[in-house]
């Protein structure tokens, strides 16, 4: 063979077993070959291993290939070799300077049609998929949709023809196929997020507390109508807040305690916050609801900060008034910025999660804003959305793997 420098791609497939990589790279080491790239995947105990190596100028490649074939045969593997022209390799190296993005697909179960549609959108935008990683554990055959969640992560490279167009395509695909699709720039901030700020009502808990209070007080329908209009962005939040609180006048304080003790925690919330805490994240509740219930969740879940509204209580009964400044959408954004400053964090390191129109200011301010089971207007204006699984779906947008965080 030629004594010019050679670049060769070794492709190995077959049944996985311990020691394969050590044996094959040992052959390359014997001949002082340089490994330019290496990648391995194991699907259902079937190995796919690729090694791109360089035979330096003045050395023969034939003995290396012969030894690799022999070792592969002994191990019961199939081996293929592909010579790579230097110009092709140089072009591939230069691609590494291009933009990188992460596409996260999330759902109860993932079908071929869903992954196919997402891959097609990526390809039409001129992006190349570098690798695909499964983030969730393997799904038992007898598992029901209520018991499962499935997520894969694609690392893609290139410059999209249109970021707005690819985002719109992902939104439409999410609606059509019942999955969530995250699209994020793969930069240093994505790998170094440290603060998560949550809305409370209909986000950390599966209810609107003010509606619960109103139902007990006999003004449920009236308050609920105002709440829904405010969440849709049809009413000014502060005005609607004052109206709703005024309807609670005379409610006994003991009702608040009973409701707090029975708050319906959102699926995945405890797993999410436990994981975040174990990895050093700070968490905050920024709520247009009430401090009384935020403090209960702070203690129950281990949240670091709580900012919400205080109800005035006199002689054990609500007066129908609040104390202090109302925590509305703009105030939530201000508080998010304040906590980031206290924690010495860049705003790109902050995640905000919410479901209502009054959450949009903080969702848009944070480096990663997530609309969680949100109203249509909120989903359309947020950077990311989760609608198919619980709050722990956020872990997959952050790149966490079930193998490391448990189930």
Image (tube, grey):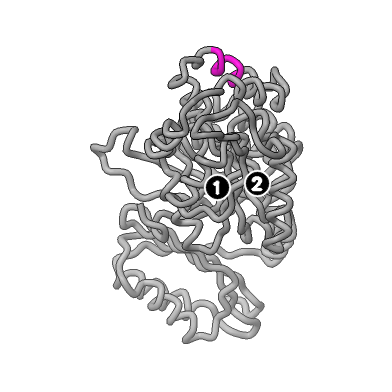
- Is residue 129 among the parts visible in the rendering? no
Please give left or right for residue 299 compared with residue 83 in the image.
Answer: left
The magenta segment is: 222-228
**Dot 1 crowding, Cα within 10 Å, few <14, some 14–19, many 20+:** many
As helix, strand or loop, the secondary structure at mark 1 comes to helix
Residue 11, percent from left and from top: 46, 62
Q: In what element is the residue under mark 2?
A: strand
State whether the magenta stretch is mostly helix, strand or loop.
helix
Residue position for label 2: 368
* 218 sits to left or right of 195: left
**From the viewer's perspective, is residue 282 above or below residue 129?**
below
Q: Quadrant of residue 58?
A: bottom right
In the foreground, 182 or 288: 288
Q: Which is nearer the eye, 91 or 325?
A: 325
Above or below — where is 166 with respect to 88?
above
Residue 25 circle label: none
Tell whether label 1 touches label 2 (CB within 8 Å). Answer: yes
Residue 24 falls in image quadrant: bottom left
Q: Which residue is mark 1?
A: 397
Of badges 2 and 1, the one in the foreground is: 2
For the N terminus, the quadrant is bottom right
């Amino acid at each position: 063979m030629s004594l010019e420098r050679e670049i060769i791609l070794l492709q190995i497939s077959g049944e996985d077993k311990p020691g394969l990589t050590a044996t094959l790279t040992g052959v390359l080491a014997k001949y002082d070959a340089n490994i330019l790239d290496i990648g391995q995947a194991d699907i259902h105990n079937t190995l796919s291993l690729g090694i791109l190596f360089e035979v330096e100028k003045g050395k023969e490649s034939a003995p290396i290939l012969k030894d690799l074939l022999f070792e592969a045969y002994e191990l019961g593997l199939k081996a293929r070799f592909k010579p790579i022209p230097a110009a092709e390799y140089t072009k591939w190296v230069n691609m590494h300077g291009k933009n990188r993005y992460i596409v996260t697909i999330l759902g109860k179960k993932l079908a071929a049609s869903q992954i196919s549609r997402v891959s097609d959108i990526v390809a039409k935008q001129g992006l190349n998929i570098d690798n695909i990683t499964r983030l969730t554990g393997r799904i038992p055959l007898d598992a029901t949709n209520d018991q499962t969640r499935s997520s894969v992560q694609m690392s893609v490279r290139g410059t999209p023809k249109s970021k707005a167009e690819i985002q719109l395509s992902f939104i439409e695909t999410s609606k059509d196929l019942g999955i969530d699709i995250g699209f994020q720039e793969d930069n240093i901030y994505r790998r170094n997020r440290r603060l998560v700020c949550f809305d409370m009502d209909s986000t950390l808990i599966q209810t609107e507390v003010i509606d619960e209070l109103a139902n007990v007080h006999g003004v449920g329908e009236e308050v609920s109508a105002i709440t829904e209009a405010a969440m849709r962005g049809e009413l000014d939040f502060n005005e609607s807040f004052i109206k709703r609180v005024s309807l609670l006048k005379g409610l006994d304080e003991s009702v608040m305690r009973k409701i707090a003790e029975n708050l319906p925690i959102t699926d995945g919330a405890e797993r999410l916050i436990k994981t975040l805490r174990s990895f050093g994240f700070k968490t905050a509740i920024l709520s247009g609801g009430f401090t009384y219930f935020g403090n209960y969740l702070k203690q129950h879940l281990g949240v670091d900060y709580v900012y919400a509204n205080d109800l005035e209580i006199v002689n054990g009964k609500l007066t129908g008034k609040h104390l202090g400044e109302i925590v509305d959408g703009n105030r939530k954004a201000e508080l998010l910025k304040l906590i980031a400053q206290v924690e010495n964090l860049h705003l790109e390191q902050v995640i905000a999660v919410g479901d209502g129109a009054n959450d949009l200011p903080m969702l848009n301010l944070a480096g990663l804003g997530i609309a969680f089971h949100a109203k249509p207007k909120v989903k359309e204006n947020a950077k990311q959305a989760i609608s198919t699984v619980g709050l722990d779906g956020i872990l997959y947008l952050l790149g966490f793997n079930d193998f490391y965080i448990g189930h």
